[in-house]
Amino acid sequence: MKNRFFSFAAYCLSALFIVGGISGCVKHKFDEPPIADLPVLTATHTIAQILGRHTIGAAPDLIADSVILEAIVAADDESGNFYKNMVIQDATSGVQVRVDATSFYVNYPIKRRVWIKAKNLYIGDYNGVPQISFNAAGDGIPQALLAQYIVGGERNQTLTPAIKTIDQLGDADLNMLVQLDSVQFAAADQLQPYANGVTSTSLNRTVESCDGGTIIVRTSGYANFADASTPQGKGSIVAVYSKFGATKQLYIRNTDDVTMSGARCGQGGNPITISALRAAFTGSPVLAPRGVVTGIVISDKNNGNFDGRNLVVQDATGGMTFRLDAAHNANVGDEIQIAVGTDSIKLFNGLVQTYASAGTINLLSMGNTVTPRIATIADIIANASAWQSTLVEVQNASLSGGSTFNGSRTLNDGSGTTTVYTRSSANFASAAVPTGNLAFVRGVLSEFNGLQILMRDITDVSGGTVPTYIFQENFSSVTVNAAVALNGWTNVAVQGSTLWQGKQFPVNTGNLFAEMTAYQTNPTQPIVESWLVTPAINLTTNSILTFETARAFTPASTLTAYISTNFTGDVTTATWTQLPATIAQVASGQYVFVGSGDVDLSAYSGNVHIAFKYLGGDPTGTMTYRVDNVQVREQ
């Protein structure tokens, strides 16, 4: 017969059919029989003695004599994390008792004394974990026979977990309740679901000790706490110790077994204000003072305008950007603690950054509010160093330099100007920039070779007028690495055969655009001239054209924007007028999108075509050019 041993480490498919029944059960309080009426049996053996009858890895052994075990239930099936397994222990050892029953916790709950009348049962193991089963195939005791083999005694007995370290856990602790202190979930497993309750998928989460060592916490996808989040702090965990092969594992009974609200490893000791942290930096890289910073998160990880490893925190004394060793899970408004003192404080393109570990972040509370500092741009410039990495708000200002937020936009309130910068990966990068006077623009005051404000989301700007657009193209429907073939557009090579291509950056997830380059066209195409022409655009009076360009690599290629009123499909026979638009140059940087500025089309009306002409050749001019967000609006 095929060996069918199971443990709570491996759930059989029948769980799919019973989970609905379990979740539909209603808990009732059952009257505890008077103590005088409870049975009292006399144990004949300890669990350790019975385990000694079986060789791990060998076939199960029949218990042929009259054996009675006395033990306390350490784990039941109430939470769904122990499927058809009752875990019991006495002073000598622990063992799983396989039961072919559900909701057995009603009669045999945690901390109830039980006697196992083990005659004719089997002692075996599953992947090295000892278990008692109904037969040699590893089946559980049928529900109708439970009372014949398992006798319940007094409830709420004392059950004290053995305090252990990860390194101390061994086979003698299998199926025993243990407690690990000064532990925390690993950085990647903080604030993550214990398992996937939606797909009923079991998952492993890693717990690490402050003294070194790690162990897996295994949770069933059928557990009623599967979708609960793991804590972010440090503390203790109580669990049943198990293993799967050579892999040590813990199984908790419910989330009450996990108490982790303290500062994470390395976060104890001296509390440090952000102003004190910044004061330690005097211009050259320096080791941060050791301690813990407490503050409110003001950067946003969800909308794409902040690097996932950058965390900006503000307290009552100032703000600081933390550059982490891994992506973090902290949200805007989270009050956190983060350990410092194991890495440096240094400048990155003008921004003071403290380097730290994402694993030292401890969540204290959520939903907090930081009120932005309302200031003029002149005040911001004057106090840039002191206000860096804090939340600021500029009122009664205007934005210019491009029709969308993507890239650098100029903010002007009459007292001065500064840059509002939006990454192309931000989910609001292609949103239209309101024209006219804005009620406010707010964001995190930052620096990248110059002062800039980083918005968190589109609600960080208010007021102004969203323009009426006659024409818009953001190339979101191009096919990556294929010639641009959008409806109504003309993509033609006048010299050579290289056409404008659809591209994306970051690859697979980022912004889409049109790109042209003469790279590697030599010797067959010493001169490359390629045109990308819009469909006909029916201009109203006083129309404005805007677009964005970016460039990289070898100079000498050119990109020029033109307009034509008589284009019919052949770029060589149409009359073209060059437009006075700003085009990205070497000084703009590699692949940095630059706004064209507002190109006045008021001299034109009716149908026109806008064209982008690339001229280059390998090896003299193979510069790559990108075009994006071509828009025409009414003034």
Image (cartoon, rainbow, N blue to C red):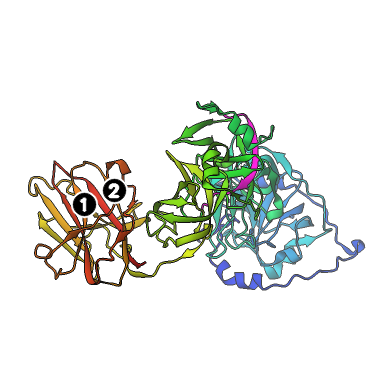
Q: Position of residue 275 (x, y in %)?
A: 63, 35
User: Is residue 413 left or right of 632 when viewed as pictured?
Assistant: right
Q: Earlier in the sequence, mark 2 or mark 1?
A: 1
Q: Position of residue 175 (x, y in %)?
A: 67, 49
- For the residue pair 542 and 555, the one nearer the viewer reads as 542
From the image, tell me which residue sits under label 1: 559
Residue beneath the point at 67% across and 73% down: 24
Tell me: residue 148, above or below residue 345: below
Query: What is the three-letter code of the residue carrying label 1?
Result: Leu
Q: Which residues are magenta?
A: 288-301
Quarter of the view holding residue 470: bottom left
Magenta-drawn stretch contains 294: yes
Image label count: 2
Marks 2 and 1 close (CB-CB < 8 Å)? yes
Residue beneath the point at 44% across and 36% down: 349
Task: Tell which residue pokes out farthest to the right in this image.
Answer: 36
Q: Quadrant of the C terminus?
A: bottom left
Task: Tell which residue pokes out farthest to the left in this image.
Answer: 524
Tell me: residue 479, above or below residue 617: below
- For the residue pair 549 and 191, the one nearer the viewer reads as 549
User: Is residue 565 left or right of 345 when viewed as pictured?
Assistant: left
From the image, tell me which residue sits under label 2: 584
Query: What is the three-letter code of the residue carrying label 2?
Result: Ala
Disc 1 residue crowd, few under 14, some 14–19, many 20+, Cα 10 Å = many
